[in-house]
Amino acid sequence: MVRNDQQITDTNSSQELPVTATGGGGATHKKLTLIPLIFLIYFEVAGGPYGEEPAVKAAGPLLALLGFLIFPFIWSIPEALITAELCTTYPGDGGFVIWADRAFGPFWGSIMGTWKFLSGVISIVSFPILCIDYLKKSYPVFGSGLIRYLAIIISTLILSFLNYTGLNIVGYASVGLGIVSLLPFLIMSVVAIPQIHPHRWLSLGQKGVKKDWNLYGNTLYWNLNFWDTISTIAGEVDKPQKTFPLALFIAVIFTCLAYLIPLFAVTGAVSVDQSLWENGFMADAAQMIVGKWLKIWIELGAVLSVIGLFEASLSSCSFQVLGMANIGFLPRFCAARSKWFNTPWVGILGATVITLGVSFLDFKDLISSTNFLYSLGMLLEFASFLWLRIKKPQLRRPYRVPMGMPGLVIMCLVPSVFLVWIMVIATKTVFLVSGLMTVGGIVWFFFMKLCKAKEWCVFSTIQVEE
């Protein structure tokens, strides 16, 4: 496991530089505690019921409800359990990159970093787009054209700067954002109770409407994945061996309820054309059930939720860059932190630039590309988890998934089948984009090896004890 007295060794010299486990160059700072970590995990994954509406449009109320009820057992819980075990075993910034490296070596660690980083930054830009889709319900000017793209770009830049101000600020802000953005859905759900007709929950959709399994699968996956992305900030958490398992346990329950309660309420209380169930429909439903004022609150909540989603995701991406620099996958300057806020500014800048570069893509294409790349990373993550159990059975694991190897194989096999399905139903465009990005990641790995061999850049390596 990563120790607090780790040493960074310059691969170009024999000099050893002391550094904290977070790679902060000896800087000390306040670490994340349980409550902020719970809400950061919540915003890594969900941020509220925003974005679950397309599941109803794609397959009808019954399958949407079953999806959000069953999918956590197929996907969310196994991913959270694996994250809890490996985060407490290797509690350092870098997360899943370290896991793949320890299991299969540097090449696969680097490829894991490529897949997860790119899926993360592509996902980030979908949050401002989702927010704009809610706002255009009341302000049609955001529907298309220059105003829409300017709003996406400006909001991305502002939110990136907010992330630069510090992880603790982001963590505690997430608590407030989570409460304020979820409260209107709770109000709507309570008011909707007398209006609910249970038979509406049994509807498989309108006759003659073809089910869109691509949209259905990607909506479930996009709304309930990314549990492991919090692992990239493990070095920033206070007592991670104890804090991570508890935070993940609470966050899984909290997130699933935040999706299911409003979905049961609205599908039971509102009967509308299935085609209306698009991003932003929850705001329209709030007006039907309660009134205009609650619609405005939910639209405002969408903005607040997007801030939380953006900040949590950008934090994970930027600390992944820092972690990869600490273990020698990237040049040492990539681990640089801000003097004022102790944040990994190189990672924040890189993620923001890529985010702006893909901001012109369609929301559906963004989700599909994110899911495809993330699926590749998760297949490697499951393999790393199982191989570490076989390869290093005596490794100290402060938290251990309470199963034997047969149970663990089944636990990983079921979601892996879903991952393969997500990739099979992807469009040719998504295949092409993901393939090019993977090739780019392979080229990058060998380019970094060349940089080390030619001493074009200084690289550092944290010595890890297990």
Image (cartoon, grey):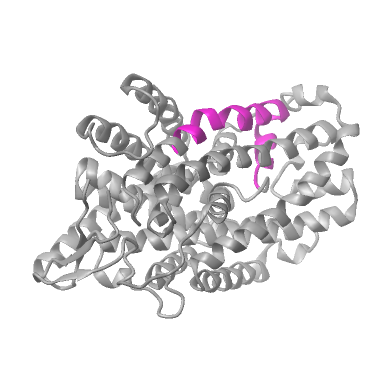
Instruction: Look at the image and tell me whether residue 136 can be seen.
Output: no
Q: Is residue 67 magenta?
A: yes
Which residue lies at the image location 86% right of the left edge and 30% below the top edge? 196
Question: Residue 195, percent across and down?
Answer: 90, 33
Magenta stretch bounds:
51-79
Picture coordinates of residue 82, whole percent (x, y): 40, 37
Res 400 quadrant in image:
top left
Q: Residue at x 51, y 73 (%)?
A: 165
Q: Quadrant of residue 130?
A: bottom right
Q: Is residue 161 left or right of residue 14?
A: right
Magenta stretch, main secondary structure, is helix
Q: Position of residue 260 (x, y in %)?
A: 69, 35
| Along the viewing direction, whichever of 292 and 262 lies nearer the viewer | 262
Q: Nearer the viewer, residue 129 or 344?
A: 344
Give the quarter of the image for residue 421: top left
The verdict on residue 36 being magenta is no
Residue drawn at x 23%, y 40% is 103
Q: Is residue 300 left or right of residue 465?
A: right
Give the residue at x 27% y 39%. Answer: 396
